[in-house]
């Protein structure tokens, strides 16, 4: 029996990607991207997509949102959008609508991703790998993490708002950074440095310290970092990767993801050529007497940019098959 079509969407801080899926398989040819700034709400995005796609009849919809989900309703952290299943159902004429945190969707995708889309960054030490929970860490427009636990043939994916915990401080320079960052919101959180706009803020802080007035976007910083001609950009990249390694190491100790840590998101992928040179492994393992313990957690970067859509499709397919 052929699975019905479903509507899936991944709402980031900047763009929304929408697609059609059948079962857990996303039709990649159906994927379209919409700039969030061009639409007042998600309902208009989905209505535009369905109109452009010829009005397909969908048996269900699942939406991944870059923000907290409370009683099925989500609010974007970085945009004034409220995602209500009832409003989505009305706009799409779909009876069954689920709303997930975007990292939960990424977690539901893990067992359906091609192995080629997982690039190893830090291998587990020989003889120390073993099955267990997995951790997904998103570094993009924002920062967040989700733990994936396999149980009775299903995946339980916990929600969190890990990007809004306190930025770790271990040196006088990092204390100055935290004081600079908290000027924006009165609080220095992890996402304020470890994200796209966080990278821009980190470079601005380094530039101020060097007496420079130039500022750059995250894309410009990454492009210039690749050619290696600007020492200040290299210093910014080093600081970013070392903080990322430390924070991800903290999360690993919190969740014990023996099944692996998976970095996702545009910023996480953009740093892939620099992780080894900038010392990600050393920062990840920098836990004093627990450094050797960290060798049990392999770290990967997910190179499938559509993993959240796959996770939405997989979650919705399971819900529809089990009648939930």
Image (cartoon, rainbow, N blue to C red):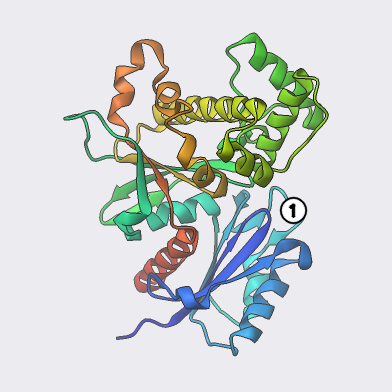
Q: Where is residue 147 in the image (x, y as percent from the top left)?
A: 42, 42
**Vertical position of residue 229 compared to residue 315: above or below:** above
Q: What element carries label 1?
A: loop
Q: Determine the residue positioned at 40% across, 33% down.
A: 255
Quarter of the image where the C terminus is located? bottom left
Quadrant in which residue 289 is drawn: top left
**Vertical position of residue 157 compared to residue 241: above or below:** below
* Count of numbered badges drawn on the protein: 1
Quadrant in which residue 173 is drawn: top right
Q: Would residue 111 appear left or right of 38 to someone viewing this image?
A: left
Q: Which residue lies furthest to the right in this view?
A: 213
- Asked if one can make out residue 225 in the rendered structure from this viewpoint, the answer is yes
Q: Would residue 271 appear left or right of 229 to someone viewing this image?
A: left
Q: Determine the residue positioned at 78% across, 27% down.
A: 186
Q: Position of residue 254 (x, y in %)?
A: 43, 28
Quadrant in which residue 290 is drawn: top left
- Asked if one can make out residue 324 in the rendered structure from this viewpoint, the answer is no
Q: Where is residue 266 in the image (x, y as percent from the top left)?
A: 55, 49
In-front residue for pair 185/238: 238
Q: Determine the residue positioned at 74% across, 39% down.
A: 216
Q: Determine the residue positioned at 65% across, 30% down.
A: 230
Quarter of the image where the N terminus is located? bottom left
In-front residue for pair 277/2: 277
In-front residue for pair 145/271: 271
Q: Residue furthest left?
A: 127
Q: Identify the residue under disc 1.
A: 79
Q: Position of residue 32 (x, y in %)?
A: 59, 72
């Amino acid at each position: 029996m052929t699975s019905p079509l479903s509507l899936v969407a991944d709402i980031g801080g900047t763009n929304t990607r929408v697609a059609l899926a059948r079962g857990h398989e996303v039709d990649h040819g159906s994927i379209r991207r919409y700039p969030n700034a061009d639409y007042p709400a998600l309902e208009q995005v989905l209505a535009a997509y369905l109109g452009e796609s010829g009005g397909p009849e969908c048996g269900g919809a699942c939406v991944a949102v870059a923000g907290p989900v409370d009683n099925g309703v989500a609010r974007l952290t970085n945009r004034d959008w409220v995602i209500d299943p009832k409003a989505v159902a009305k706009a799409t004429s779909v009876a069954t609508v689920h709303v997930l945190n975007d990292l939960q969707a990424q977690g539901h995708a893990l067992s359906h991703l091609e192995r080629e889309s997982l690039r190893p960054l830090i291998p587990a030490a020989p003889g120390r790998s073993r099955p267990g929970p997995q951790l997904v860490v998103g570094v993009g427009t924002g920062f967040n993490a989700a733990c994936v636990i396999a149980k009775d043939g299903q995946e339980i994916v916990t929600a969190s708002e890990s990007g809004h915990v306190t930025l770790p401080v271990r040196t006088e320079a990092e204390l100055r950074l935290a004081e600079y960052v908290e000027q924006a919101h009165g609080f220095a959180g992890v996402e304020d440095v470890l994200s796209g706009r966080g990278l821009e803020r980190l470079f601005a802080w380094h530039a101020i310290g060097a007496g420079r007035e130039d500022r750059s976007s995250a894309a410009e910083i990454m492009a210039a970092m690749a050619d290696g001609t600007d020492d200040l950009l290299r210093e910014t990249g080093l600081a970013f990767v070392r903080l990322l390694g430390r924070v991800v190491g903290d999360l690993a100790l919190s969740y014990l993801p023996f099944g692996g840590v998976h970095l996702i998101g545009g910023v996480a992928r953009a740093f892939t050529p620099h992780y080894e040179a900038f010392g990600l492994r050393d920062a990840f393992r920098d836990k004093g007497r627990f450094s050797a313990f960290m060798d049990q957690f392999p770290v990967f970067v997910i190179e499938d940019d559509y993993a959240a859509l796959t996770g939405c499709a997989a979650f919705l397919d399971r819900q529809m098959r089990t009648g939930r």
